[in-house]
Amino acid sequence: MRKIESIDKLTNKILPPEKISKTNRMGISFLVIFVVLFAVFTLLALPLSAFFWEGLAEWNAEASSEILLSWGVENTVARNIIGMHVGSSLVFFEVSSLCAGDLEIALLFALILATPGILFWKKLLGAILGTVLLLLINPLRITITLFLTNTSDLETGELYHSIIFRLFLFALLVLYYLVWYRLARRKASAHPKKKKKKA
């Protein structure tokens, strides 16, 4: 709470309360906290946990390879590299830590933790559940991209990569956040705080 309060004080100095509405102030505080948290996650947390994301990239490659085989697409996998035929050429695709969704997960954590008016444990639980959902769906996203590439060509595959890879997780992230926020706010409004009666 101290960090949030200090950010609020900074906001007060930049934008005095008498010059801006309460709603706008909450929006600005949310934006400032979100930017700070996202910077901390991307510049500190992700580099320190690089070994985890590298291992996750290998797991994504192996899982995607198994799904492709079940769909009838012959391929080989070595650590985080998947090899398969595209047309008459054997092409190798690297599943990197970016493919593991590290930036999207950092974005999700920052977005949820910066949300005002919701208890911290609900935020933390929502961020963890969202992370699990993204991690479980991610191999399917990789598989679909490779499958479409296998049935077309590299140029078309690059287009699929740009659309599916870059937009799918982001769209899922936004949808999850909206659903989580609505549920968290509904539960909060369903149990309003009781006012103490004066003696």
Image: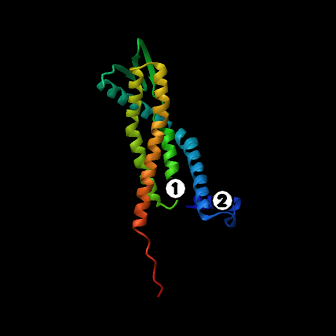
* Residue lying farthest to the top in this orientation: 88
Instruction: Estimate the x, y position of residue 175 in percent, counting from the top left.
Output: 44, 46
| Image height of 109 relative to 73, above or below | below
Query: Tag 1, which secondary structure?
Result: loop
The label shown at residue 115 is 1
Instruction: Estimate the x, y position of residue 119 in percent, counting from the top left.
Output: 46, 61
Q: The N terminus lies in which quarter of the figure?
A: bottom right
Answer with left or right where residue 193 lies relative to residue 32: left
| Image height of 131 relative to 197, above or below | above
User: What residue is pinned by disc 2?
Assistant: 11
Residue occupying the point 46% across, 77% down: 195
Who comes first in sequence, dot 2 or dot 1? 2
Residue occupying the point 49% across, 26% down: 159
Q: Is residue 97 visible?
A: no
Instruction: Estimate the x, y position of residue 63 in percent, counting from the top left.
Output: 35, 30
What residue type is disc 1 on? Thr
Residue occupying the point 57% across, 51% down: 34
